[in-house]
Image: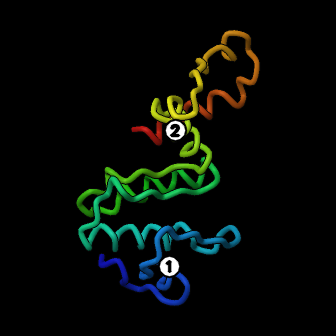
Amino acid sequence: MAWDEGLEGPAFAIAQTEDSPLRVMAGPGTGKSYAMKRRVARLLEEGNDPRRILAVTFTRTAAAELVKELRALDVEGCENIRAGTLHSFCFWLLSKEEVFGFLNRTARPLTTFLDRKILQFEGAPLLQDQNNLAG
């Protein structure tokens, strides 16, 4: 399917714009992820490097669905798109060795909370998000 097939209104405007970066703010169920998916399809069809495409959403549920849908685009390079939650992207970025060096910080292991059963309800999803974004 062509990126613009059946698109109209705000979804078409989102998918066709050359603005970068692009932020779309709207309520739940308004088609943000659908428009983002079609925008990514356009970018890939135009030959953009998929490693330079970042698709971010807020919830893990929406991110998991977005990753699944982006992989299913069946456009060359779709498997190399970085997609996930805003929090997982920030965590991934801040945990890069270059950032620690620049900030003169020392990395601390994240597994200590699992040993003590403290914050495990937040730790497991955080680690899963980071693994999904990095992979």
Tell me residue 41's x, y (percent): 35, 69
* Badge 1 element: helix
Which residue is at a point 57% across and 70% down the rendered structure image?
32
Seen as rendered, the residue at the extreme bottom is: 9
Colouring rule applied to residues: rainbow
* Badge 2 element: helix
Give amino acid for label 2.
Answer: Trp
Which residue is at a point 52% across and 34% down the rendered structure image?
102
- Find residue 134 and report its image quarter: top left
Question: In the shown orientation, is residue 115 left or right of residue 93?
Answer: right
**Quadrant the C terminus occupies:** top left
- Find residue 121 and report its image quarter: top right
Q: Count how many numbered circles sit on residues in the image.
A: 2
Which residue is at a point 50% across and 70% down the rendered structure image?
34
Tell me residue 119's x, y (percent): 75, 24
- Find residue 76 and report its image quarter: bottom left
Give amino acid for label 1.
Answer: Ile
Tell me the residue that label 2 is attached to. Answer: 92
Question: In the shown orientation, is residue 3 left or right of residue 56?
Answer: left
Which label number is shown at residue 71?
none
Considering only vertical position in the picture, is 3 above or below 114? below
Tell me residue 61's x, y (percent): 60, 50
Which label number is shown at residue 14?
1
Q: CA distance from mark 1 to mark 2?
A: 26 Å
Q: Nearer the viewer, residue 20 or 79?
A: 20
Question: In the shown orientation, is residue 47 left or right of residue 31?
Answer: left
Which residue is at a point 59% across and 51% down the rendered structure image?
86
Seen as rendered, the residue at the extreme top is: 115
Considering only vertical position in the picture, is 123 above or below 45? above
Q: Earlier in the sequence, mark 1 or mark 2?
A: 1
Tell me residue 107's x, y (percent): 57, 22
Tell me the mark number nearer the camera, choosing from 1 and 2.
Answer: 2
